[in-house]
Amino acid sequence: MNKKNEVGKGLRSLLSNIEKTNNPLERGILVKELSNRIAMISPKDIEVNPFQPRTEFDTDQLNDLATSIRNSGLIQPITVRSVGGNKYQLISGERRLRASKLAGLTEIPAYVRVANDEQMLEMALVENIQRADLNAIEIAISYQRLMEECNLTHETLSERVGKNRSTVTNYVRLLKLPPMIQNSVKISELSMGHARALAGVEDLSLQLKVYKQVLEQTLSVRALEKLIQSYQEPNTKETPKPLDGITPEIQKLETEISAILGVKIDIKRNTKGAGSLVLSFNNDNEFNQILEALRN
């Protein structure tokens, strides 16, 4: 029997045991085990939740996600409910499910849960988050599951897990990153700090460009933040500072007047037009030369 069949058989056995037991303690243990297990399920065996309020999805965004999933796989599993046999009903992740179908995947990762076990599921997920070996993406997925499957707000979730609301929000934002960046976090190519900085870049093309630079140049988080800032702020190095008021025309006048007077001059001028003309001389002869030129 291959590994895929073993996993499928184990999942069906676990679901069957949960349905059969009337012992709350035993059921809690089984639900906890189920909450940490990821099953590979065919999209054809998943029916959309009829109570899903969202019915329209942006086609371009779906195609972009499908391309990312085709290249990097589906990082964040969807969540389904077993409805008997090998059939399931979608609980959360319809956008991921649709994009996976567009990508041509025959199997996708999914968390499987049973109905009416919300409290035990919440306890299991909260306990799972306390594990020390979870990476940032795994923590983010656990937070997202708690909010979606247990109907928790960011505020309530932060109280459940003992974290600041901003911490929870920062983790969940990571799930908006493209799959390839999420995968880099999972395999420790990027730290939470890197991922958080990248999540703040709204332009996808810039986000991917900066991400590649981080990997190629092994940039620190601080260096990454400066790089992002350099792309997002106007480049002032190639243009005169506003208070200098030195344009190419002014520079040309400096050259002409210097030729007339025979000494170096500097024109200082602000944006309102006010300024000064500075004549430089190195000795009395140059000073007298300036006076004579001005008299003439």
Image: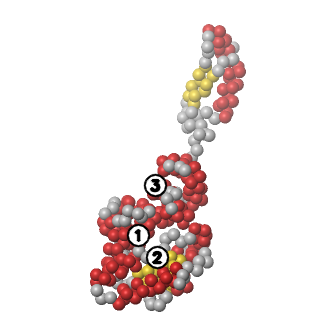
Q: Disc 3 marks which amino acid?
A: Gly
Q: Residue at x 33, y 66 (%)?
A: 161
Viewer-nearest of discs 2 and 3: 2
Other-residue count near label 3 (Cα within 10 Å), few / some / many at <14 / 14–19 / ≥20: some
- Foreground residue among 107 and 43: 107
| Local SS, label 1 | helix
Which disc is residue 142 wearing?
1
Quadrant housing residue 172: bottom left
* Residue 38 circle label: 2
> Does residue 146 appear anywhere in the picture?
yes
Which of these two is toward me, 57 or 261?
Answer: 57
Foreground mark, 1 or 2, reads 2
Q: What residue appears at the point 61 percent right and 13 percent down from the top-left corner?
A: 282
**Dot 1: within a 10 Å radius of its alpha carbon, few (fewer than 14), some, or many (20 or more) residues?**
many
Question: Where in the figure is residue 285, as x and y percent of width and height?
Answer: 65, 9
Count of numbered badges drawn on the protein: 3
| Residue type, mark 2 in image | Ile
- Callouts 3 and 1 close, C-beta under 8 Å: no
Q: Identify residue for label 3.
A: 193
SS at badge 2 = strand
Left or right: 187 in relation to 63: left
Tag 1: amino acid: Ser
Determine the CA span between mark 3 and mark 1: 19 Å
The percent position of residue 166, horizontal first and vertical second, equals 37, 59
Gap in angstroms between the C-alphas marked 2 and 3:
27 Å
Give x and y (percent) for residue 169.
Answer: 40, 62
Report helix, strand or loop for mark 3.
helix
